[in-house]
Image: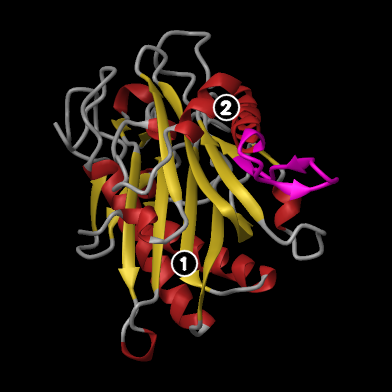
Amino acid sequence: MLKGLTDIEGILVGHVTDLEGMTGCTVVLCGKGAVGGVDIRGSATGSAELAVLDPAHITTQIHAIALCGGSAFGLEAASGVRLFLEKKGIGFPTGPTQVVPIVPAAVLYDLSLGKPGIRPTREMGEAAAAAASAAPISEGAVGAGTGATVGKIFGMRQAMKSGIGSATVWLDGPYAGIRVAALAAVNAVGDVRDPETGRLIAGTRVDPQSLDLADSALQLRRGARAGFRGRNTTLVVVATNASLNKVETNKLAQFGSLGVARAISPVWTMSDGDITFALSCGVEQAGLDALGAAAAEAVAQAIVRAVKMAPSIAGLPGLAG
């Protein structure tokens, strides 16, 4: 059985979900350390500690990634992840007994749903880290995907529910045993298209009573303006059991972003804050282009699963019913 991101040995994933506030956080732990990379495509990002992923930065490994709702308020949850790891003695050594966990973080905007004033906190981040396991990924309206939605060209009344999705692609031939997995929290202003069929499957609806899709890209070409400016983000984590350096891991993140472009339309708009992270957690050897092709496929599959597994909740329809 494919587990999604936790198919990569050394990766643990934990969620905390608050259905009252329609928010939450998702923590990806790589406690033994992983080489990290990032690709920023959105124009309305909310993030922290991304500089540590630059190949010129002194740190060679990171220890977790925090994906959170709550917009910029949700960045507080990453502090809880650091506290959890510090208690475990995991982090960048800064002295005989001191460590500083390296935890890049990114947030999405979910403040339009749920009870006002409830946002991911330091305690929620610590709890999500404590809940992290190698079990199959919980998908749908959980963790950072709790308040995620898609299709907001005409506002929230004509949007659809989205959430978290995860998928794994296995390489073959001389690369048998090597795998690339992805996790996506999908909160796009645009629609989700299934690359296998070419059909739009979730997004902006023609009207609040209909499940017929308006085709957001078409509406933009007809003069519609992308609503909810700065309130949309797709956050992705790609991981592999292949060994990569920081330059290569940043390139893997770029390849992963191709999967976002395959599955979301329109993508990377001025209203989106899309970020793709990448993690190298193994010792296997594979060509970077082969890993990149797998990363793009895994990300596209994860995005499709994020909407297919989303239930109808908070007054918005979801494909999971």
In x, y percent, where is residue 302? 33, 53
Q: Considering the whole magenta stretch, tell me its main secondary structure.
A: loop
Comparing 218 with 166, the one in front is 166
**Residue 153 lies in what quarter of the image?**
top left
Q: Quick one: label 1, few (<14), some, or many (20+) residues within 10 Å? A: many
Q: Nearer the viewer, residue 140 or 132?
A: 132
Q: Name the residue under label 1.
A: 240
Residue 262 showing in the rendered view: no
Amino acid found under the numbered disc labelled 2: Ser
**Crowd rating for badge 2 (residues with CA inside 10 Å; few <14, some 14–19, many 20+):** many
Q: Describe residue 98's horizontal placement relative to residue 283 as left or right.
A: right
Asked whether the viewer can see residue 224, the reply is yes
> Disc 1 or 2, which lies upstream in sequence?
2
Place of residue 88 in the rendered image (x, y in percent of width and height, measured from the top left): 61, 38
Residue 253 higher or lower than 104, as above or below: below
Residue 13 versus residue 159: which sits nearer the camera?
13
Which amino acid does the dot numbered 1 rest on? Thr
Work out which residue is located at the far top of the displayed protein and give it: 116
User: Looking at the image, is 142 positioned above or below residue 45?
Assistant: above
User: Which residue occupies 54% across, 27% down?
Assistant: 126
Residue tagged 2: 71
Residue 96 magenta: yes
